[in-house]
Amino acid sequence: MWKKLIAYYKPHRLLFALDMAAAFIVAVCDLFYPVITRGMINDYIPNRQMRTMLLWAGILIALYIVKALLSYFMQYYGHLVGVRMQAHMRRDVFTHLQKLPFQYFDGNKTGTIMSRIVGDLMDISELAHHGPEDLFISLVLLIGSFVILCSINVWLTLIIFCFIPVLVWIAARKRVKLDQAFTDSRVKIGEVNADLENSIAGIRVSKAFGSGEHETEKFQRGNMAFVESRARAYQVMAEFFSSTGFIQDLLNAITIVAGGVFWYYGKIDVGDFTAYLLFIGIFLNPIKKLVSFVEMYQSGMTGFKRFLEIMAAEPEQEAPGAAVLGQVKGEIDFKDVTFVYDESKTVLSHVDLHIGAGRTVALVGPSGGGKTTLCHLLPRFYDVAGGVVSIDGQDVTRVTYESLRRNIGIVQQEVFLFTGTIRENIAYGNLEASDEQIVEAAKKARIHDYVMTLPEGYDTYVGERGMKLSGGQKQRIAIARLFLKNPPILILDEATSALDNVTELQIQQSLDELCHGRTTLVVAHRLSTIKNADEIVVLTDHGVEERGTHAQLLEKKDGIYRELYDVQFKAL
């Protein structure tokens, strides 16, 4: 895992090397103070060498100025390394998310994914900057103080350093508990973020049902689970810090007692003893840094493990040497197609269906019959468990994702608009489109006149997920987006079922124009919208049960389509 983390340092190795060099010089500067103090107490002050004393005092001030400048460099540019690494990781994980199949998002909450991308990477950034820096400074100070302390008194130094293994043993013993505790708290905060994201997105529903108290209680359960998890983590941290802190305090007491005994027997003079006490203070600082590093390490590496879990998720795989799907006529074949969801539920079983180029085929049937799933197999949102889906005779698993999806347009019941302007959302159909092309697409979708009544026109902000627009307006923008994309194959998945009858009729006219000359699959519950389809296919969990035109299917008195039709229109 460390190798993967180190790989993110490579683009910033020069700045990182300079940061480490600054850290080394700062550590060396800290070692000078006790040495100069020792010289002053043992030599310069007793011998009244005022000039030499002032000279060394000036050198000490100069060193502190250098240390201040280097500390500024470390704080600014060191953090910059961490932030750039964080941005690099965030870019990688976002790019990877774009390549993951629908199954991944079916099984992972949006809030949990966001928690990993934002919170976890922030802790990784802190570790990436402070971790190596603190370790390096600590090692320099430990080694430097050990060497200098040995030059003062070897035996006293060995007595003090005997306690280092005790600290290492405590840290190693608590490390596993810290890892488990921090991992659990990460999972819990991810769940809290997921609940929060879900509650905010559904705020209109909760208000409509007056269930704000229920949502608060539900959120509070997750919130308290996080508190309990974090409390366990802090309990382990408390055990760690209190035990290591006790050893550090014990070192101070042992240093004073042992140093006093050595001075009593004439093994050390006052200047050396004073320098020794100062060096012990320097010696304890890196130990404190190392103790703090353990918490930082656990938090950062736990976040990095969660980052790697996303990066390890299997992306959508193209076949070796996948061809580019070009010049599409629109002939579609489903041959003996079987689809199993989550390896347990069979949604489609041995489905055979041929759709001629330029024809409009409607899929109807009871809920759960696999209509939407069948449509999702065409652009490979999901892959078949058996059989072949082909366009113009080409197996869709043998062509590139980009060329496949470029030739397919989808309008769904729930239109998703990105936070931004009307112009930006229409342009999503063709990011290189000119303003004239965007306006033309809007006219075809019959949304242009409405846009022109807005004070900011096409630059009107649509709100999060298009909340500032009505359902019909959002559908028109989605249709304009497809006019701009101009794909040879269309999928209309309950595109008008959420609209009122008048709006549905108006949008249906735009859809009819959009479908003209294109192969179109229509998923519909309202049978009135598909009367003019070239063919209607009745799909159930047993596969294709019936197919034919509207008139042909109505002639089957005991047919499924006739039954659906009678149920819908009996009340009219």
Image (cartoon, rainbow, N blue to C red):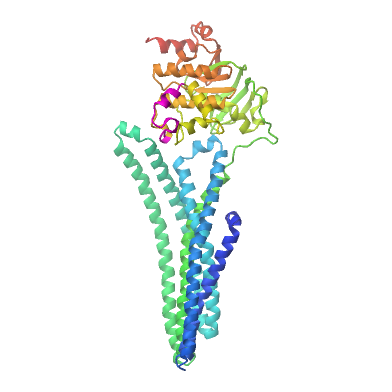
- Residue 139 in the image, given as x and y percentages of width and height: 54, 70
Residue 542 visible, this angle: no
Total labels: the figure holds 0
Task: Establish if 480 lies above or below 71.
Answer: above
Identify the image quadrant of residue 518. top right
Residue sitting nearer the eye, 338 or 279: 279
Magenta stretch: residue 453 in it? yes
| Residue at the outermost right position | 321
Magenta stretch: residue 570 in it? no
Residue sitting nearer the eye, 253 or 144: 144
| Residue at the outermost bottom position | 47
- Residue 325 in the image, given as x and y percentages of width and height: 66, 28
- Residue at x 49%, y 61% (from the top left corner): 76
Q: Which residues are magenta?
A: 446-464
Task: Establish if 496 lies above or below 121.
Answer: above
Residue 61 visible, this angle: yes
Task: Establish if 296 lies above or below 497.
Answer: below
- Residue 367 in the image, given as x and y percentages of width and height: 47, 22
In the rendered image, which quarter contains the C terminus? top left
Residue sitting nearer the eye, 331 or 339: 331
- Residue at x 39%, y 19% (from the top left corner): 500
Task: Establish if 295 lies above or below 288.
Answer: above
Residue sitting nearer the eye, 182 or 326: 326
In the rendered image, which quarter contains the N terminus? bottom right
Q: Is residue 354 left or right of residue 418?
A: right
- Residue 84 in the image, given as x and y percentages of width and height: 53, 54
